[in-house]
Amino acid sequence: MGVKGRLTRLLRLDRERRKVLDEIKRLGPWFYSFQLGDGLETPLIDEWLALAHETRFAMILPELDAHFSGRWSEVTCLDMGCNEGYVGFEIAKLGAKAVVGFDARAANIEKAEFVNRHLRLPNIKFHVGDVTALTPEAYGLFNLTLCLGLLYHLESPIDVLRRARAVTTELCVIDTQVLKPGPAVAAVWGPKVEETEDVIGLLEEPKCDWNPLASTRRISLVPNRSALFTMLRHVGFTDVRQLMPYEGCFDQYATFDRVIAIAK
């Protein structure tokens, strides 16, 4: 290739790079940092998110590897409320047979599809969808389901967990904020007063119209840890356990204001 040809190629690559940078800017702000190659990456909306995302995957990955080791090529995964698709991409990179991600916000799915045009992973697909429409008939069954950063943004968490159970054949991973520990609550229940440690708080999210991380319905029901585990058992998961944080992890996991549960 002559000097003119090399110059033409460099100019073309520069135009392509500028086009990608324009798309990154147009699609932002970004909740995840994606490495797109050629030194290009999506900028985090806030730097503290990097440790949060690192902690989540560092806690989950050993569990998944232990369970699916040697058979990733047979594993199907559903990423519910996938946001920009980050964890689904990581599962696809592990060699999963197929990963399906959906999110209620079209803007999030546009980001995920943009990222995959650069990652070029053939085993992952995305679409716009609402978790309240999740059924085996519509989606099929999956060895692994992910409910990450979703449950505490829902107005009907038990219904969604029941739907997750219906499409899960092996493992469901739940990552959620929980209420801080507090005293038991009581209610008049027939002729007596019943106490329970299972508590769910109702929080309003009035900024949901512009915040891609908020509820789409303005009202969220946030469980405490006890209520979370009761709900998981109630919908049919028979083996539920909490993953423990590690030294130096994101502080919300360390203080148990956020928990990760593995449900079988």
Image: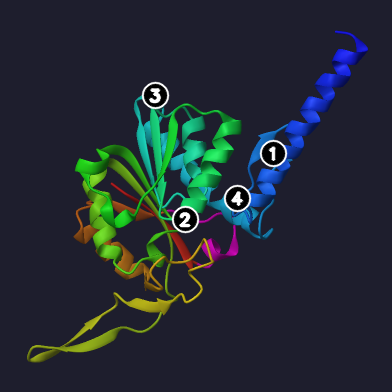
Spatial separation of the CA atoms under disc 4 and disc 3: 26 Å
Q: Nearer the viewer, mark 1 or mark 3?
A: 1
Where, by quadrant of the figure, is residue 4 drawn?
A: top right
Kind of element beneath mark 2: loop
Lower sequence index among marks 2 and 3: 3
Asked if disc 2 and disc 3 are in contact, CB closer than 8 Å, the reply is no
Which residue type does callout 2 highlight? Met
Q: Residue furthest right?
A: 3
Q: Nearer the viewer, mark 1 or mark 2?
A: 1
Which residue type does callout 4 highlight? Tyr
Magenta stretch? 243-255
Name the residue tied to disc 1.
20
Position of residue 47 relative to residue 116, above or below, is below
Residue shown at the point (69%, 39%) measured from the top left: 20
The majority secondary structure of the magenta stretch comes to loop
Between 245 and 145, the one lying in front of the other is 145
Name the residue tied to disc 2.
244
Spatial separation of the CA atoms under disc 1 and disc 4: 17 Å
Position of residue 226 relative to residue 247, above or below, is below
Colouring style:
rainbow
Residue 31 falls left or right of residue 132: right
Residue 97, image x, y percentages = 39, 27
Asked if disc 2 and disc 4 are in contact, CB closer than 8 Å, the reply is no
Residue 211, image x, y percentages = 53, 66
Which residue type does callout 3 highlight? Ser
Q: Nearer the viewer, mark 2 or mark 3?
A: 3
Where, by quadrant of the figure, is residue 125 drawn?
A: top left
Name the residue tied to disc 4.
32
